Amino acid sequence: MKNKAVFLDRDGTIILDREYLADPAGVEILKGAASGIRALRQAGFMVMVTSNQSGVARGFFTEQDIWRVHERMQELLAAEGAELDGIYYCPHYPEGKVREYVRTCYCRKPGPDMLFTAAQERNIDLFESWAIGDKATDIEFGFKQGLRTILVLTGYGIKTQSQGFNSSLKPDLIVPDMEAAASKIIAAGDSHPGKRG
Ligand SMILES: [Mg+2]
Ligand SMILES: [Zn+2]
């Protein structure tokens, strides 16, 4: 049997969005994130992080900085009993400045590559999985590959909601935070609406 997973955005969904965070000291876990992650894993979901980190291509920080930030994030989550199953990020940006990272890629959300890579590496059924984030790109990212989607109202979520959605990219659910998202996912059980297959 294939695994089911929840793909979480990082900034504004798990940790405070500080805009191009390079310093691990700036990592602050949002309220409800650790308990939500814990609940999802207890319910049998893999919990993956999928994050656009164009600050690398823009020359604001390096991949090593990202790794240190992730180490700190995992340490703080672990202190609350929450573990992640994987972290994927895209360091690219088409109009960046750091030559080796300047490209139009398929991993920058809403591009699908982080989903495809994770699905392949961890034997995940994307149709049984969910994507959660605070921006329209997070919703589009999940929707396009057949995942169910949730907008959280942390980070840019309230702004995203106020800007409205183009009908096909409307999130399946809108909730206050990660803890509420986890409750909804668990309550939904295996009742996939089958709207895309
Ligand atoms: Mg975000
Ligand atoms: Zn990329």
Image (tube, grey):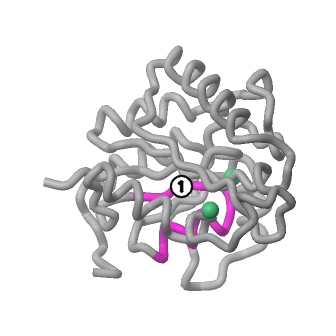
In this picture, is 25 found above or below 54? Answer: above
Q: Which residue is farthest top?
A: 79
Residue shown at 25% from the left, 63% from the top: 191
In the foreground, 48 or 64: 64
Where is the N terminus found, in terms of image quarters?
A: bottom left
Q: Which residue is mark 1?
A: 132
**Residue 181 within the magenta-colored segment of the rendering:** no
Residue type beneath disc 1:
Ile
What span is colored magenta in the figure? 130-144
For disc 1, the neighbor class at 10 Å (few under 14, some 14 to 19, many from 20) is many
From the top left corner, tell me how far across and down residue 76 is, in percent: 59, 20
Q: Is residue 101 visible?
A: yes
Q: Which residue is farthest front?
A: 100
Q: Which residue is farthest bottom?
A: 167
In this picture, is 30 found above or below 119? Answer: above
In the foreground, 118 or 142: 118
Where is the C terminus found, in terms of image quarters?
A: bottom left
In this picture, is 166 found above or below 93? Answer: below
